[in-house]
Image (cartoon, grey):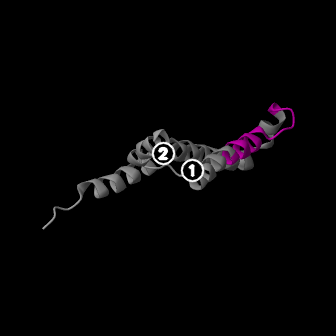
Amino acid sequence: MTPPDDNATGSTEDAAAAQLFDIRRIIGGLFVLYGVVLIVAGIFDGASAEEQAAGIDINVWAGLGMALTGAFFLVWMWLRPLGSPAQASGDQQVERS
């Protein structure tokens, strides 16, 4: 009997952990969350807030900018997911050969 290959399960767990703690996910999620909060605040604040900002509803515009920035990070994470560290080191050794 051959022993089970612990390296294969370890690499899938490492890849899952890398995906979970991808900084793009954290930054994108926070930007989208705060952007939505600002958009809602901008919609429901009174006319006095718009008068203070020279007629511009600054909370809505800042919220839209933040939400779009967060969406950019999340789409980037989705289109270019991280590989496992073992896979990256294996790619470097192939290039050297």
- Secondary structure of the residue carrying numbered label 2: loop
First-in-chain label (2 vs 1): 2
* Residue 51 falls in image quadrant: top right
Magenta-drawn stretch, dominant element (helix, strand or loop): helix
Cα distance in 3D space between marks 2 and 1: 8 Å
Count every numbered label the image shows and give the total: 2
User: Which region of the structure is painted magenta?
Assistant: 52-68
**Residue 41, visible in the rendered structure:** no
Q: Is 5 positioned to the left or the right of 91 in the image?
A: left
- Secondary structure of the residue carrying numbered label 1: helix
- Taking the spot 72% from the left edge, 42% from the top edge, the residue there is 65
Q: Horizontal and vertical percent for residue 87?
A: 42, 49
Q: Horizontal and vertical percent for residue 40?
A: 68, 50
* Residue placed most toward the observer, 57 or 65: 65
Q: In the image as oriented, which residue stretches furthest toward the right?
A: 55
* Three-letter amino acid code at the position of disc 1: Met
Q: Is residue 63 magenta?
A: yes
Q: Quadrant of the C terminus?
A: top left
* Residue 63 falls in image quadrant: top right
Q: Does the magenta stretch include residue 26?
A: no
Q: Name the residue under label 1.
A: 77
